[in-house]
Amino acid sequence: MSTEPVLLELKGITKRFPGVVANDGVEFDLKRGEVHALLGENGAGKSTLMNVLYGLYQPDEGEIRVNGKPAQIRSPKDAIDLGIGMVHQHFMLIPVMTVAENIVLASEPTHAGILLDYDAAVRRVEQIARTFKFAIDPRARVENIGVGQQQRVEILKALYRSADILILDEPTAVLTPQETKELFGILRSLTAEGMSVIFISHKLNEVLEIADRITVLRRGKTIETLPREGATQPQLAKLMVGREVLLRVDKKPAEPGDPLLVVENLSVLDERGLEAVKGVSFEVRAGEIVGIAGVDGNGQSELIDAITGLTKIQGGEIHVGTHDVTGDSARERLDEGVGHIPQDRQRRGLVLDFSLAENLGLHDFRKEPNSRYGFLFPARLVTWARRVLKAFDVRGGGPETLASALSGGNQQKVVIAREVERDPRVLIAGQPTRGLDVGAIEFVHRRLVEERDEGRAVLLVSLELEEILSLSDRILVIYEGRIVGEYGPDVTEEELGVAMTGGTREAAA
Amino acid sequence: MTVTPPAPAPEQEVVYERRARVYERAGGVLIPLAATVLAFLIGGLVVLITGHNPLTAYKAIFEGAGFNWFVPWVQGDERTEAARDLQQTLRVATPLMLTALAVAFAFRCGLFNIGGQGQYWLGFIGALWVGTHIHGLSRPLHVILGIAAGIALGALWGGIAGLLRATVGAHEVITTIMLNWIAIFGGVYLYEGGGPLQGSVAALPRSDVLDGSARLWIIWPAYLHAGFLIAIAALLVYYVILNRTTLGYEVRAVGFNPEAARYSGIGVRRSYFLALAISGAFAGLAGAVDVLGFKYSVDTSDFSTNFVGFTGIAVALLGRNKAIGIFFAAILFAALTTGTSSRQLDPDIFEPALATYLSTMIQALVIFFVGAEFLIVSVWGARRYLRARPAAREKPAL
């Protein structure tokens, strides 16, 4: 790999914003045919650096060299002309247009110079897709294809414009594990064809899987560039965070008490009216974490919604403590002591346009002293919020800051703070660390274990097997709406993996 | 624990927070203001093209709206005249404030209430009926009853749309537009020849004039009635409901993010219903104060010439759904109306017919520029925006 020529060099890049140095003399280079990962926590300066490279920012100091020649990149157009393509975290596609139309947009093949030659566009897209071993239907409408496919369209867009350097900004954040695997397959065939990829991420396992070299950024500075060979997760985490990070959660054995959440023979229909949860029974006792492992879409969301009262159930019963909450509304269940950390904090956990104080009060604004006789006392919410934010070490703003201004990790702290401060008996956590960086994950995990030790019953639903394994005292595997297995904390990832894909049930049958 | 560099000192953080809020508020004022100025500039250009002097035209509108009353050296007859003009401006502004609130309140719940016009008519008809069919009440009681009827019928009309949205999910834009037409043609039916509420003169398609005891007090003779104070009280009520009650909190939560509201056990459907009913109440109140304040009766032709409910949409937009913003936006729109009405404007300065078009054009331009805010921001400030945003994101602990 080291014999390959250096394609791109960033030398001493410094970019200042008022009050902060986002990039401080960053060094980075990219060789032909490699995947070079840019690793760092949220706010480490990864995106700034890539925006400099893509011409969205001008660096205050430093030099960019492409193919050994100094390059002035003043706009994305300059970047594209130099063969640099970028796939942003949020796709820039036109939903009503087809895949091919999106890809050729702005440089369409034409009939007589004015009419779009659609067939030529489709042929061209098919040809590129074949070269790089993509599976995609050029005639499908973008709005009808999945997120993983949309990402391929973005990559194809860059390839269509003859990019040979591809920047991927946190590409796996929106993907399922399966889609991630497919993406990695695509990246391998791209590099095999001589393309170079800059892969931005804060997920250690992914970086170790796909990258040839890894550059770690911390607080705007290049900490180290190292080859993948010999790199380990704890080593990278330490470089990233600047101190030892506990990747394994430190916890005592559980001391389970009485069952606090009892689910009996629960059946739930999904949005299409199909049975998504089929007669599930389990219990979660005080002081234990029960993990529900499964591949996405096997009834986990419906199960959570049913327990929290957000969806009607088809049959079965749900008890919190000794109280039957089956017929209760979401609000009544909250008051009965069910805390809920939703799977999608931005869409469901927070009102992003509300202040942090208003978000923290979302469940209890009706109660004294927050309100009386229907009148709300915002100042009291603020005072209370100030204390809670401090207790949970939420950074990036005060009670009156809008939730949208916070980083993902801090947003999640706000959600957790709100749920935990109500002293719930049952805490349901749906993918509580999705999209968070290492430091924030550590916080969330530690907090969940603390809540367990406080005597709450914690139900953890996660797609991350690692998370399930490191936190759970008992593990249930859900497959096609049924609980197909129960395991102790010592089960191996392989065993769970087999069960999650229906292996056990077939073996039993 | 997110590992970040040492957070700024708490005092520093509070300062940043305050500064951010000041910027946010300043932006909220600046854009409507800039839109208005821009609209007047372009309007002036048009006046110039038609061969008139824009400055004299604007001066005439300014005086026609009675704003010269605030100028200390305007005295004598001129001052009396100015006072009368100003009273009319405020009288026109009154229902605009209320119909704008009808749009704004629904909007804060994420709903687009186009039904202000119909809700206005329901309130108007209800209050008029109380004024013409109930007799012998003391004045305060009669007035209160009339207003209550207006509010109730307006709330009913808004509530129907709310109920449809909450139960079967019918989109409020469609239903409120349909309800507008039902109200308008229903009104014509009620008062036309042979209609159930037609007045005592059989030849005229109009109502009777309501009793003196049902009329609102005149607070600034000759024109300004107590409805103006009621509208200001309604602005306060709007602010208080929205920001100081649990209901307003729910409405805002639903408006910003219905999904998160639902996750917190807030009744989203209930909020939709209540928001539209309360919106309707504001518009109904507008109709009530109009009829009890100075119209006193209705003619079937009024149903096709009165657009106060629709103008309210523009006022709410310009006022950014804020109580104080709506107050000033309503006065601006009212001033453009009275300032260019043929009675006030000297035909030598500007042809009256053209003047009305000028004011309509300025109103339209104001709305266009407020609406084009996103366009302006994206074209004009795109680079700055791009620089500022990721900066905030990259900023370690702020």
Image: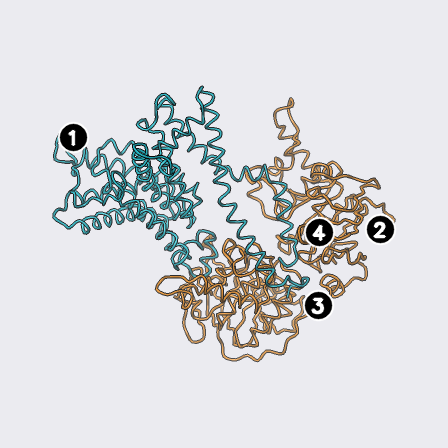
Chain colours: A orange, B cyan
Label 1 and label 4: CA atoms lie apart by 81 Å
Circle 1: is it few (<14), some (14-19), or many (20+) Cα within 10 Å?
some
Circle 1 marks a residue in which chain?
Answer: B
- Residue that mark 4 sits on: A184
Label 2 and label 1: CA atoms lie apart by 95 Å
- Residue that mark 2 sits on: A1
Mark 2 or mark 3, which has the lower sequence index?
2
Label 2 and label 3: CA atoms lie apart by 31 Å
Label 3 and label 1: CA atoms lie apart by 87 Å
Name the residue type under label 4: Phe
Tag shown at residue B204: 1
Between circles 2 and 3, the one closer to the viewer is 3
Circle 3 marks a residue in which chain?
Answer: A
Q: Quadrant of residue A119?
A: top right
Label 4 and label 2: CA atoms lie apart by 19 Å
Mark 4 or mark 3, which has the lower sequence index?
4
What is the secondary structure assignment of the residue under circle 3? loop
